Amino acid sequence: MIELKNVTKNFHQKNRIVSALSDVSLKVPPGKIFGVIGTSGAGKSTLIRCVNLLERPTSGEIIVDGKSLIQLSNAQLAIERRQIGMIFQHFNLLSSRTVFENVAFPLELVGVSKSEIKTRVLELLQLVGLAEKANDYPASLSGGQKQRVAIARTLANNPKVLLCDEATSALDPATTRSILNLLKDINRRLNITILLITHQMEVVKSICDEVAVISHGKLIEQGSVGEIFADPKHELTKEFISSSLHIDIPTVYQERLQKEDGEGLSPLLRLEMTGKSVNEPVISEVSRLFDTNFKIVSAQMDQAGDVNFGVMLIELSGKRENYEAAIQYFISKHIKTEIIGYV
Amino acid sequence: MSESIFELLLKGTWETIVMTFVSGFFGFALGLPTGILLFLTRKNQILEQPVLNRTLSVLVNIFRSIPFIILIVWMIPFTRALVGTSIGVSAALVPLSIGAAPFIARLVENSLLGLPAGLIEAARALGATPFQIVYKVLLPEALPSLINAASITLITLVGYSAMGGAVGAGGLGQVGYQYGYIGYDAVTMNSVLGLLVLLVFLIQFAGDFLSKRFDHR
């Protein structure tokens, strides 16, 4: 549905050429949600702005829904852009228009009749759950509500494709989740292909089918979310994944934690399950095989694509002489195991 | 205060109001499109045209650097050709409009520069043409600040029109100059001043009110 072929973008900056994108190629299949993740300044924003030519690439080809966009005239491009929805980090709503009028904006541009605008806008506001706010001005809305209005506005044109430029980066976690759910819903119900850029692995994990990692203007890794989480190749990718798996040792344990083993102490283990880990009920197996007990102190397990992964903090007890064998068993099942200390 | 002075002041006030608002209107008719063009042809804007932008900018700067009292005199041949006379209210309208236009153009350009760049970007992404961006995005979004620009302009024009009064433009300026200064009449002079101050306050008040009325940010 969206295809970028060898896209390169250079900026001229005071007699210097800065390369924002070099030789980027990617393909988003119809109906999928594709995420591009990268740190700030990696070129993500330039990448997504190249798709609807808000930014003209220096070289390369951009194909959306089978049409190559680069050669189009400005007038043709304006028409083609109506097929390509876009939402932004800072929403970019018109402050002089009410919620209703904001959503009506793209319809006015193409000369839709007043009565038709009315039914369509109300239908869209219903879809994003903001029907009762129709006559409010954007200034009185929360960030999440503003993004919903922006989504309704961009859907007014019935786009085939939706570009999300850090659409949840200015929102709090709960609002982020509700916007992501809405995007997923739109993707399923209206069959709209989504390309999004983000610096949050949570976003990729929760709604993307495929992901690409961008660094210094190059795509360093791409594949299905399951594949990438199961077997990240690049250091940066691993960092992104582990940043989404964060676990703290609770203060009570922190205070009791000893470096050396001793009488009456039990080891505190950190188990990290990646896509390589065996998909078996390992913990109860170990418990049975080695006559040991586990107390789960804290855990964060998650699913990305078809891969189960996460971290777990457990306190081991039971037969002391079997501890080593139990740990070896975890390792043999590809669970990264680490003794943090003794409590 | 005699009856005739009272009538003079009344007539002067009316003439000043006419000069201010009519030249303000023509000033905007010239300055608004110029300001929009100055904005749109800037670097990285939707109609980027470096040569046109620089030419316009130089022209605006030249007209802005001519002192108004010189502009009136310098424009006399043009004014005569246009309205057939070089004295009176209708003659004053010509240099007043021409003097205000570049000033307005810069104010308009500035108002548009104050808008978030994301608005234009969003409109482009939604398939708006440059013309649609101007009249559906830029002008409505900048309206509160354009109203402020209008009150600043009108107040400047009150001052300019009074200056014009010294060289035969009519209005309160002429009354103050002729009767107050040359005729050495302190009461007339101070009445003129009071009326001018009142006029300026009224314009500012109305401008602030309207600007707030249309501001939904």
Image: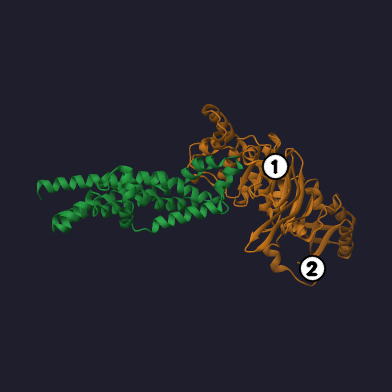
Give the class, few, some or many, for how many residues have Cα within 10 Å of label 2's Cα (few <14, many ≥20): few
Mark 2 residue type = Gly
Image depth: mark 1 or mark 2 in front: 1
- Which chain is the one coloured orange? A
Q: Nearer the viewer, residue A189 or B19?
A: B19
The label shown at residue A159 is none
A30 relative to B75, above or below: above
B69 relative to A82, above or below: below
The label shown at residue A264 is 2
Mark 1 residue type = Leu
Which residue is the site of mark 1?
A: A69
Q: Is residue A215 visible?
A: yes
Q: Chain of mark 2?
A: A
State the SS at label 1: loop
State the SS at label 2: loop
Q: Nearer the viewer, residue A105 or A189?
A: A105
Task: Residue at the far left: name it.
Answer: B2
Q: Position of residue A61 (x, y in %)?
A: 74, 46
B183 relative to B140, above or below: below
Q: What color was chain B assigned in the picture?
A: green
Q: Chain of mark 1?
A: A
